[in-house]
Every structure is written in structure tokens, then in C-alpha cells.
Amino acid sequence: MSHHSLAVGALVSWLLTEALGAYMARNWVTSGAARRRRESPDGMSLPVLVGHAGLNLTGLCCWIVFVLTGSVLAAWLAICFMVPAIGLGVSTVSVWTPYPVARPDAELRAAEEEARHRAIQDQVIARSLDDETLARQLVEDLLAVNLAVGAAKAPRRPSLDPRALVPLAHGILAIATFLLATLGAVSAS
């Protein structure tokens, strides 16, 4: 494979990676997370995100110069910008990626809400201490409610959140871009 084919392949991969990155950044801003991060310092760091995007965009510009002119210096410069950009990108993965979790469904929430509303009043408990029939009915009602909530809480298999695929694809494309760019720069040298 010629260095020009590798260079164009890296360019296409880089552009796809940038497009997914721009999509994630747009969603981050439009969801209001950029404004909320001031109130919650454990969220995504704006300087890290801007540094990641800025270094990648600068590297992409250098790579475009390499593809157009064949300048080996521009190719290696692009890779030099890409390395810290990838490091900053990796540091955001744990904050950005939504992990698969089991979410309570409407049935479970309704059963829990019903159980909260069916709290036993003190006078009912006091009367049931003297009346065996009332005590038996109270125990049966409690069992029925708790079994209904327990059945609704049956273990469910965690589902994969499809939003996790976007940063995953972004990361895989970044690795492919780095490999293609490095191979393209080596073959052009």
C-alpha cells in the first residue's frame, strides 16, 4: 500500500472521528451539561475537552497539509499533536461513557409508590394487637404488598445504553487514525 493511500485512509478516518467528536460535544452543550458543570465539579472538564478537540483539529490541519503537499514534517507534526489529544480523550472516557445499568420500569415504580401509600397507621396496629382476625388480615396484606414489590424487583439483565456506542466508535476510529497516520508518515519518510 502506498503512502498516499495510507494518508488518504488516515484522513477519512480522522474526519469520521472528528465528526463523532463534534456530535458528542454538541450533545454535551445542548443538554445543558456545559452549564451544570460549574455546579458539579466532578463532571466533564471544559479545558480538557477544549484541549482534546483543539489538539485534534490542529493535527488534522497538519495532516491535510501532508496529504496535499507530501511534506513529511507536516505528517510527523500531525502525529505529535494527535498523541496528547488521544491522552486527553482517554481521560474523559470514564466521565463521558454511560455504563449499562438496570433501570426500574414503570411497574416497579408503581408498586413501590403503592407500598409507600399503604403505610400502616398506629391505631390499626394497636387494634390488631387485641384482635387476632385483624392481625391475621394485616399480616396477609403486608405479605401481599411486599411480595408484589419483590416480584416487580426481580433481577433483570442490565441493558446496554446505545449512547455508549458513540464514544466507543469515536475511540476505535481514533486508534485506527493513529495507526494509519503513523504508517503513512513512516512510509513517506
Image: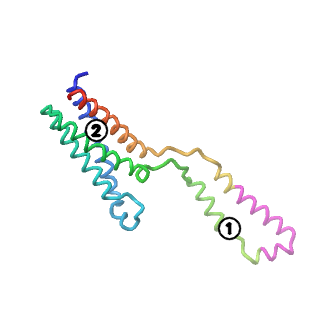
Structural crowding at the residue carrying mark 2, measured as other residues with C-alpha within 10 Å and reported as few (<14), some (14–19) or many (≥20): some
Q: Which numbered mark, 2 or 1, is in the foreground of this view? A: 2
Residue beneath label 2, please?
16
Which label's residue is closer to the chain start, 2 or 1? 2
Regarding mark 1 in the picture, which secondary structure is present there?
A: loop
Image quadrant in which you'd find residue 43: bottom left
Task: Estimate the x, y position of residue 31 in percent, counting from the top left.
Answer: 35, 57
The residue type indicated by label 2 comes to Leu
Check the image and tell me how it is coloured: rainbow
Task: Estimate the x, y position of residue 177 in percent, counting from the top left.
Answer: 30, 36
User: Looking at this rendering, what residue extends furthest in the top direction?
Assistant: 1
Residue beneath label 1, please?
118
User: Are the residues at dot 2 and dot 1 in contact (C-beta closer than 8 Å)?
Assistant: no
The residue type indicated by label 1 comes to Arg
Q: Is residue 139 magenta?
A: yes
- The range drawn in magenta is 125-147
Task: Estimate the x, y position of residue 126 in percent, counting from the top left.
Answer: 80, 77
Q: Is residue 146 magenta?
A: yes
In the rendered image, the vertical position of residue 62 relative to residue 3, given as above or below: below
Viewer-proximal residue among 173 and 72: 72
Residue at x-position 78% and y-position 61% = 140
